[in-house]
Amino acid sequence: MSNSSRERILSAIRQSQGSQPATGGEMTDRLKTRPRGPLTSVADDLEAALVDRLRIAACTVAYASSAAEIVSEIIQWLQRQGTDMKLVRSASPMLDSMSWPEVVDVRHPAEGMDHNTTVSEAFCAIAETGSLVKLSSDASPTALNFLPDNFICLLQRQRIVRHIEDVWDLIRKEQAGMPRAVNIITGPSRTADVEQTIQLGAHGPRRMHVIIYS
Amino acid sequence: MKTNTREFPQRAQEALLDERLQAALGKARGGFVDKRRAALDELPEFEQLRLAARAIKEHTLSHLEEYLLQFESEVESSGGQVHWATDPAEACDIAVSLCRDANAQLIAKGKTMVGEEIGLNEALEAAKLRVVETDLGEYIIQLADEPPSHIIAPAVHKSRGEIAELFESHHHGEGFLRPLESVPDIVDEARRVLRDEFLAADVGITGANMLIAETGSTVLVTNEGNGDLTSSLPPVHIVIASIEKVVPTLEDTTILLRLLARSATGQPITSYTSFFTGPKRSSDLGGPEQFHVVLVDNGRSQMLGNAYRDMLRCIRCGACLNHCPVYGAVGGHAYGWVYPGPMGSVLTPLMIGLGDGHVLADASTLCGRCEDVCPMSIPLPRMLREHRLQSHHDGLMKPLARGALGFWAAIARRPRLYRWLVERKSRLLHRIAGKRGYLRKVPMAAGWTNSRDLPAPQGGSFVAAWQQRQKNEGSGK
């Protein structure tokens, strides 16, 4: 049944196209050349532009220059939030190299994701929009970006790109095709469905903390 | 879904007198318009982007068959499946049988307007499946058993008090705050209730803002993160999307994204913009085992060849609703079907038939704001006129209106008679109005005079005055 529907839809499209000349060049060309459209202007200092936008999107931002500094920043941040010292961390060379003090209960996602805080690392960040990009993988399940109250995301300073288009080039270069999920994340979860009032923490994280390291 | 489009005039009347609704609409109106304005003030490239976006869609529509086939083959090579549905019944059947195959009992749903269009919830419930809407706005109207009143803010017509009442009557159990008052408490309660549903759901159904032919990805734009939980936690992910959502490349997608959120909520980008490509990879931690895309036609392949082709560029941002004086006055429910406002008044008659839908084409002043703000430059007023023309041809106008229009046309085609009558009429009105200069009541025009006075003509006509002036100038030489 669905096979004949496919034929019916495609033939109806062909019939409708009959009266309309094709415009704008050939399809295969476009898929090969993938032309970029107009870009928005972004300041030269990508990091400053990113941080500005992250703050507008209600993220907090901190800096670190070593694994130890990242660990102590995370502990201080958790203390400031008044939340427990339990977290789930995904994997990355940086995350794997970090050693945690006894007081912090660190789990891998495979051991369960019901802790209130997640620490993971971004694939890259976009200065244009103030976004972090997360890819699903064997080290980083997508749900980990959405289930916790507190979402802490590490970002290597060299991984800031100017425009969204640059992310696509980076994925084409470094990944074997599109991963199952690519998440462009711009701030904590929010809703304005009750009287147009913006409220953070609708279904996903209530707080998002970005640690830029070099 | 039930259609009540024919009752637009009565429902509009009721809406105008509904104080709660008017208060809710008043709050929404300025918010959307001001936020969009502020976002565009920071985007000098808006017009360039608009032209580029239009060209992308035009190109894609010109090659729609090829791009859909390319999309299908990419979905399949990433391990997913594409299903084709010509009409709503078929689309629902496909979704229901996918759920049955998965032995599903509980379905978590993200917001999908195409899902509303095909009556998906009713079909799933008829198949004894439990459906939970996870977008907060959709969840609210699901509890209230109402259709959405706005395409991006489904519960925009509800006040905080009404939402609190709904929650209090539906959520029972330990630890709920009563009475429920503040916005954060309302949102928290929904989060808590829906979190359990996400974790228990057997199938997640979402819509798609775009489909990417290059990669076989579906794109989902949300602020709450509900769409991502819906598509990542349950073992089956079903995407419902209409055929015109396809775009060629990731680069093309990016251009539309730059326009979409700014036009909708005034955000440069929403909190979450997500790209789903196939089911979980064998080594992935988490993610659905199955990934299905249901492509819905429902008349769109016809639109491609007729006067409504431009409508297929629509990206469902809702800017035309937010800027429409009629929508702003009566809200979405008056329109009586799924899509309200200017875009709805164009789409609805095409989907449910002109017989039921033609009255919506009249629910517009044709002021043109919708076309001005449309990021895809869709000529909505032209298409509304097209519907009016067709409903006139089909004899769908009320006999009185049709007769009156025919009478006017007959006279207007005889300029001498027309002028003679106009002069008589304006002198008569002038005399009746007397020194006051306005009329309190005019026969057959109560709709106007009930709420205001009609200024009376000053006597004579423009043509007569003009001729007099020409004569004076001539004699003055």
Image (tube, helix red, strand yellow):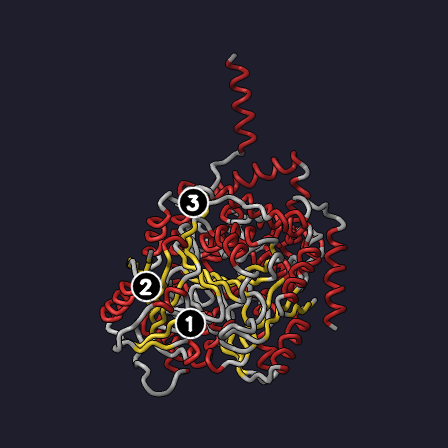
For disc 2, the chain is: A
Q: Is residue B1 visible?
A: no
* Quarter of the image where one finds residue A75: bottom left
Residue A70 in the image, given as x and y percentages of width and height: 29, 64
Left or right: B419 with respect to B472?
right
Checking the image for residue B43, the label placed there is 3
Q: Are marks 2 and 1 in contact (CB under 8 Å)?
A: no
- Near mark 3 (Cα within 10 A), the count class, few <14, some 14-19 or many ≥20, is some
Cα gap from disc 3 to disc 1, whole angstroms: 33 Å
User: Callout 2: helix, strand or loop?
Assistant: strand
Cα gap from disc 2 to disc 1, whole angstroms: 15 Å
Checking the image for residue A209, the label placed there is 2
For disc 3, the chain is: B
Q: Residue at x 33, y 53 (%)?
A: A51
Residue B429 in the image, given as x and y percentages of width and height: 50, 43
Q: Which mark is first along the chain, 1 or 2? A: 1
Checking the image for residue B269, the label placed there is none
- State whether residue B104 is above or below residue B454: below
Say which amino acid is labelled 3.
Leu
For disc 1, the chain is: A
Q: Nearer the viewer, mark 3 or mark 1?
A: 1
- Near mark 1 (Cα within 10 A), the count class, few <14, some 14-19 or many ≥20, is many
Say which amino acid is labelled 2.
His
Residue B294 in the image, given as x and y percentages of width and height: 63, 68
Q: Which residue is mark 1?
A: A144
User: Callout 3: helix, strand or loop?
Assistant: loop
